[in-house]
Amino acid sequence: MIDFESLKNLPLEERAVELRRSGKCNCCQAVAVALTEDELVFQAAGGFGGGMGNRQGSCGALAGAVIAAGIKTGGKGTPRFAGQIQENFRERCGALICRDLKGLDTGKVLCPCEDCVRNAVRAYQDVME
């Protein structure tokens, strides 16, 4: 169970960071839950953290923002919003794939996980609000 009340005074992006820091949420769950405050979303987002568990897929934080967009839109027009969120995130972070963001092949970290979480929330806010 996540204590949303204890996070209410924080900006959304810092709520997400705190959820991740707590160890209760992976990057995807932290973003999705900060934006939706929904326990079922927490469960559904579990497999998307860390680039879908192997750092080969899209950033989990980015996936969390897209999940939240789908909930906000009721699934209507979500692909368009997802594309806009992706582009906003790429501009902020430099890449979309977890492996690239973490510099696993280059040794150069483009965006640390906490910043990916912050930037995913900000990208969502820019596009959805």
Image: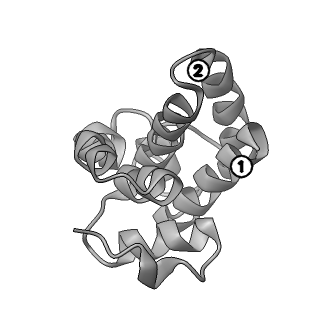
Residue at image position (52%, 42%) is: 62
Q: Quadrant of residue 122?
A: bottom right
Numbered disc 1: secondary structure: helix
Disc nearer the start of the sequence (2/1)? 2
Q: Quadrant of residue 4?
A: bottom left
Q: Quadrant of residue 20?
A: bottom left
Query: Could you tell me if residue 64 is visible in this image?
Result: yes
Q: Position of residue 88 (x, y in %)?
A: 73, 39
Query: Could you tell me if residue 108 is visible in this image?
Result: no
Image-based side of 25 in relation to 34, left or right: left
What colour scheme has been applied to the protein in the rendered image? one colour
**Of 4 and 114, the residue lying toward us:** 4
Q: Amino acid at mark 2?
A: Thr
Residue at image position (47%, 55%) is: 31
Please tell me the numbered disc located at residue 125: 1
Residues at discs 2 and 1 in contact (Cβ within 8 Å): no
Q: Position of residue 85 (x, y in %)?
A: 66, 35
**Of 43 and 63, the residue lying toward us:** 43
Q: Position of residue 42 (x, y in %)?
A: 29, 51
Numbered disc 2: secondary structure: helix
Image-based side of 25 in relation to 122, left or right: left
Residue pointed to by mark 2: 78
Q: Position of residue 80 (x, y in %)?
A: 67, 17
Quadrant into which the N terminus falls: bottom left
Q: Is residue 8 above or below residue 48?
A: below
Residue at image position (63%, 15%) is: 77
Q: How many marks?
A: 2
Q: Amino acid at mark 1?
A: Gln
